[in-house]
Image: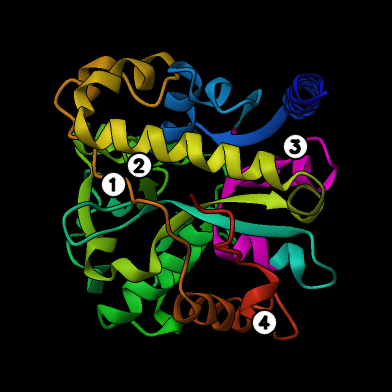
């Protein structure tokens, strides 16, 4: 009897484990990403099999702009996305739709996320020279937020700062390189392409790193109904971040394959450190919220817990 009990217990556990594995493998986790450096841990986790090793199937969908990404998310065509606090707050202002679960990149005093660049022959060299000059940004996103905060800190008033919406990064690069835009904000390594072509670095977010970031966000439905898969994604991302930080040059080929930048740019490019498991602080959240309210993007206040959840971190 005891022997049969052990056999029954073993088979029951085996069956339950199989059910869990099957449910996690049955429906892919779809994540929208921009073709930027911030998405590298996700692509490394895919390339190295970390998602699969953690029992999940992940489909990474590359989009051309923040509006395209947000449309997919709101239509329920993706479960998660690479975005930022402001974008998630905007989605949550009427009802809870988005939950930030992890930083993907943060600026540091050594490594910028975004650079405010001037066109080659514009004559613009300092933040003061940008007074009244239209700056190409992706409106209503962290890029516009960082532009305002960095230039405010550099001495420009809000009325001094002029911006023009150019959502797609390649378009911003092209307009800056041709001189049709006198200034633009670009992420790395795209900024490095512009610099090599003669663009001038006016200022970057290393001067105010706490305002600059990207995050991994999942739908509220996803975190409620498929929490184990969210945890599995973050565990795989953590493995990828650890590997990238230990051996950065090893993963440059992925950046080339995903067309983050031309090989000649990436050959000399130094991949920055990626942050370990963490989420935006309440202070960062409140500053982003204050800015979004000042821009008319959000009318009412939002609690920190409505948008940020650290419980899924490994």
Q: Mark 2 points at which residue?
A: 179
Q: Mark 3 points at which residue?
A: 78
Mark 3 or 2, closer to the camera? 3
Q: Where is residue 274 in the image (x, y as percent from the top left)?
A: 32, 45
Q: Residue 303 carries which label?
A: 4
Task: Tell me which residue sits at (20%, 27%) in the image.
Answer: 247
Q: Which mark is residue 119?
A: 1
For marks 3 and 2, the one nearer the N-term is: 3
Q: Residue 71 carries which label?
A: none
Q: Where is residue 21 in the image (x, y as percent from the top left)?
A: 72, 24
The answer to whether residue 131 of the structure is visible from this angle is: no
The answer to whether the residues at label 3 and label 2 have Cβ atoms under 8 Å apart is no
User: Is 248 inside the magenta-drawn segment?
Assistant: no
Badge 2 marks a residue whose secondary structure is loop
For marks 3 and 4, the one nearer the N-term is: 3
Q: In the drawing, does residue 158 fall left or right of residue 97?
A: left
The answer to whether the residues at label 4 and label 1 have Cβ atoms under 8 Å apart is no
- Gap in Å between the C-alphas at discs 3 and 2? 36 Å
Residue situated in front as seen by the camera: 21 or 86: 21
Badge 3 marks a residue whose secondary structure is loop
- Gap in Å between the C-alphas at discs 3 and 4? 25 Å
The answer to whether the residues at label 1 and label 2 have Cβ atoms under 8 Å apart is yes
The answer to whether the residues at label 3 and label 1 have Cβ atoms under 8 Å apart is no
- Gap in Å between the C-alphas at discs 2 and 4? 43 Å
Mark 4 or 1, closer to the camera? 4
- Gap in Å between the C-alphas at discs 3 and 1? 36 Å
For marks 4 and 1, the one nearer the N-term is: 1
Identify the magenta region. 64-89
Vertical arrangement, residue 57 with respect to residue 244, above or below:
above
């Amino acid at each position: 009897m005891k022997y049969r009990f052990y056999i029954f217990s073993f088979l029951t556990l085996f069956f339950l484990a199989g059910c869990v594995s099957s449910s996690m493998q049955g429906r892919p986790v779809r994540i929208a990403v921009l073709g930027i450096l911030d998405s590298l841990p996700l692509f490394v986790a895919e390339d190295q099999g970390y998602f699969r090793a953690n029992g999940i199937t992940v489909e990474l969908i590359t989009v051309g702009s923040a509006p395209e990404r947000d449309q997919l998310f709101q239509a329920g065509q993706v479960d998660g996305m690479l975005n930022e606090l402001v974008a998630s707050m905007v989605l949550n202002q009427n009802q809870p739709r988005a939950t930030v679960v992890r930083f993907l990149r943060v600026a540091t005093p050594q490594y910028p996320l975004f650079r405010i660049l001037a066109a080659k022959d514009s004559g613009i060299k300092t933040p003061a020279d940008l007074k009244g000059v239209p700056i190409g940004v992706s409106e209503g996103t962290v890029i516009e937020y960082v532009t305002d905060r960095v230039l405010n800190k550099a001495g420009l008033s809000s009325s001094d700062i002029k911006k023009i919406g150019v959502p797609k990064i390649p378009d911003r690069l092209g307009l800056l390189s041709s001189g049709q835009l006198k200034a633009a904000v670009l992420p790395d390594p795209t900024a490095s392409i512009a610099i090599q072509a003669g663009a001038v670095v006016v200022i970057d977010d290393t001067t105010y790193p706490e305002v600059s970031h990207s995050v991994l966000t999942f739908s509220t439905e996803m975190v409620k109904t498929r929490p184990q898969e969210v945890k599995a994604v973050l565990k795989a991302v953590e493995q990828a971040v650890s590997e990238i930080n230990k051996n950065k040059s090893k993963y440059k080929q992925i950046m080339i394959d995903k067309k983050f930048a031309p090989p000649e740019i990436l050959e000399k490019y130094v991949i920055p450190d990626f942050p370990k498991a963490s989420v935006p602080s309440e202070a960062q959240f409140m500053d982003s919220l204050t800015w979004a309210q000042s821009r008319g993007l959000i009318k009412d206040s939002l609690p920190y817990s409505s948008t940020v959840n650290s419980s899924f971190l490994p």
